[in-house]
Amino acid sequence: MTKKVAVLPGDGIGEEVMAQALRVLSAVSEIFPLKFETRHALAGGAAFDKFGSHMPEETLKLCRESDAILFGSVGGPVADMNLPKWKNCEANSILSLRKTFNFNVNLRPVKVIPELAALCPLKEEIIARGVDILFVRELLGDAYFGEKKTFLKDGRRVATDLSTYTEDQVASVAHAAFKAALKRNNKVTSVDKANVLDASKLWRTVVHEVAQEYPTVKLEDMLVDNCAMQIIRDPSQFDVVVTTNMFGDILSDAAAVLPGSLGLLASASQNEAGFGLYEPPGGSAQDIAGKGCANPIAQILSVALMLRFSFQAEEAAQAIENAVSLTLKQGLRTTDILTPDSSGKTQAVTTVQMTDGILAHLMKLSPVLS
Ligand code: IPM
Ligand code: MG
């Protein structure tokens, strides 16, 4: 059956890397028995120009009619952040999609590819132990969506963002984490601030209750401040990290420097019905937009996550991931991941050339099925 994909390229490098990801998706449909119908809609600043909204109803409607959402990136140049077009652009677009579709679980895999170890800021002996972490972040609770108020008290300004968790919110994301661990290395690290926060105490209690249903998975608790340190000290200790919305936002960005470039990371947001949005969490990189040099890998790996989680096409997902890793092994580098080769030379490829390399490996690797 044809799968309908809503394509929201957004702003900055979004359009150019999305075009490459769609070349890969189209190659997948030639190799595997999968058919896709892609329909485009505007998001972020691009949508604001036409509709006066960063996430217009037209775009939400297309998403509702689709089987999955492939998202690019949104946001404007840093210098223009206060123009109406760009003000709150990221929050308005991304948070409203999360809310509209109840995307409560966010999966962010972070892996150091041995060929790119030179880009990792950690010492060689630490990287050699292996870095392969899946962050499972709760996406609809915490201060992000709690009651917000800015007011005057005794003539002084006060602002508050209420951070709340219900046991059902915690249980849902905990199940997602344990299920993911079963397919990986059977370890879950639950990160909270249970020595101070009530919401974290409930978090910890509920995660332990859910753990009873997964006796083969090892569960450990870690306080968030310690976790921030451990990610840098010895990331090899982590398999699946499950945490709250705010801690997940911060920790996943901290870990994102390990692979060497945000241009390599893909992420998946899902609701309980299995509907999902797939995006590179790296941002719109306006400084290099339109130059043809952006790294398309994060967007291409987002396609792989979509195939795996929304369309249960594991073989096709792996074929893309293998093709990406072979292309990196072969030495192709966009500017963001440029390292000197053995002869000390560096030469960057373009967005299109990197994708050409990936497509060449994809066509070789995958069995042609009828
Ligand atoms: C992310 C982003 C968003 C978040 C912003 C843009 C609202 O940082 O997806 O991590 O904080 O969740
Ligand atoms: Mg973030």
Image: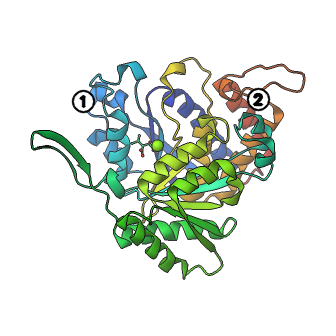
Numbered circle sitting on residue 52? 1
Q: Up-down: is 168 above or below 367?
A: below
Q: Secondary structure at mark 1?
A: loop
Res 33 seen here: no
Q: In screen coordinates, is 14 left or right of 168? A: right
Q: Position of residue 250 (x, y in %)?
A: 49, 46
Q: Position of residue 351 (x, y in %)?
A: 64, 26
Q: In screen coordinates, is 187 left or right of 367? A: left
Q: Quadrant of the C terminus?
A: bottom right
Q: Amino acid at mark 2?
A: Leu
Tell whether circle 2 marks a residue whose Cβ is less than 8 angstroms from ligand 1: no
Disc 1 crowd, CA 10 A, few/some/many (<14, 14-19, 20+) = some
Q: Amino acid at mark 1?
A: Gly
Residue at the (69%, 37%) spot, across then down:
121
Which of the 4 image quadrants contains residue 219?
Answer: bottom right
Give the spatial CA distance, label 2 vs label 1: 40 Å
Which of the 4 image quadrants contains residue 338?
Answer: top right
Q: Mark 2 or mark 1, which has the lower sequence index?
A: 1
Q: Nearer the viewer, residue 25 or 209?
A: 209
Residue at the (67%, 70%) spot, across then down:
186
Marks counted in the figure total 2
Q: Position of residue 276 (x, y in %)?
A: 46, 54
Q: Up-down: is 204 above or below 258?
A: below
Residue at the (76%, 29%) spot, across then down:
332
Q: Nearer the viewer, residue 151 or 73?
A: 151
- Which residue is farthest left? 154
Q: Position of residue 74 (x, y in %)?
A: 42, 33
Disc 2 crowd, CA 10 A, few/some/many (<14, 14-19, 20+) = many
Q: Up-down: is 307 above or below 167?
A: above
Which of the 4 image quadrants contains residue 357?
Answer: top right
Which residue carries the number 2 mark? 332
- Give yes or no for contact between labels 2 and 1 (Cβ–Cβ under 8 Å): no
